[in-house]
Image (cartoon, helix red, strand yellow):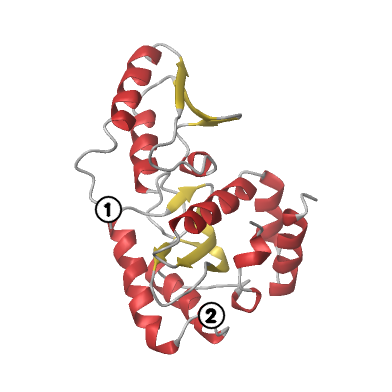
Amino acid sequence: MRPLELIARKAQSFRSQVFVTRGSNRVDAKSLLHLLTLGAEPGMELEIDATGEDASQAVEQLTELIGSEFEGFERP
Amino acid sequence: MKLCDFVVSSSIIPDLRVGTKEDAIRAMVAGLREAGSINAADEAGIVAAILKREELGSTGIGRGVAVPHTKHPSVDKLVAAIALAPEGVDFASLDGEPVFIMFLLVSPPDRPGDHLRGLENISRHLRNDNFCKFLRQSRTAEAVWDLLKEADNNEI
């Protein structure tokens, strides 16, 4: 769940609406509750899209964050 | 996976009045012990593990909901307790709002899939405004349990 918190916090730093999709489930990336419904696991493919003035930066930085597999992230 | 498969009915606390998040977690783990879902000898260790997890980042996920959790070798299957706090509990949530609904999960470390599926299941129902509203309106453990059964049958 902690990687999801990192995603939500990062998404919240943008003014754009940001979404993460797994299969047919597209959710608000700024909401931890919504992100939890993805049931995302390491190695799973997710799609990111955004609409708004800083949408391209949002998609770029979120992709980078998820693609890094949360490097340096300490697992409990 | 259904809510009624892993929520322990006799550990539901419909009217929890505590001052802190730590008190809430202690009360919920005690509820699991009283229900026979965890051993008394493991209670303090489970509370400590959940509190340690909270230090890494709050499990207050917004909309007045928190899902404190830990993996612990003393359980052989996923178990969950529910508490409702009408006065709210400060959980240091991401959205800064107090928490009124808590789902506490303890799962075996060697079954990470169950843990994830439990959280996914709970969050899917909590996204439903009616489920949250009816849950907060429940005054007894029986009413909460009936609501969980309705949610499992997609009747909400």
Q: Is residue B12 left or right of residue A76?
A: right
Residue kind at label 2, given as amino acid type: Ser
Q: Are marks 2 and 1 in contact (CB under 8 Å)?
A: no
Residue B77 visible in the current orientation: yes
Label 2 element class: loop
Q: Is residue B136 left or right of residue B43?
A: right
Count of numbered tags:
2
Residue B154: x and y, percent?
A: 77, 49
- 10 Å crowding of disc 2: few (<14), some (14-19), many (20+): many
Label 1 element class: loop
Residue A35: x and y, percent?
A: 48, 39
User: Residue at position x 37%, y 19% from top?
Assistant: A59
Residue A60: x and y, percent?
A: 32, 18
Decide: is B41 above or below A54: below
Looking at the image, the residue that sits furthest to the left is A72
Residue B64 visible in the current orientation: no
Residue kind at label 1, given as amino acid type: Arg
Where residue B72 sits, quadrant-wise, is bottom left
Looking at the image, the residue that sits furthest to the right is B155
User: Residue at position x 54%, y 56% from top?
Assistant: B118
Spatial CA distance of label 2 from label 1 is 26 Å
Q: Which residue is mark 2?
A: B37
User: Residue at position x 39%, y 45% from top?
Assistant: B94
Q: What's the mark number on residue A75?
A: 1
Decide: is A29 above or below B141: above
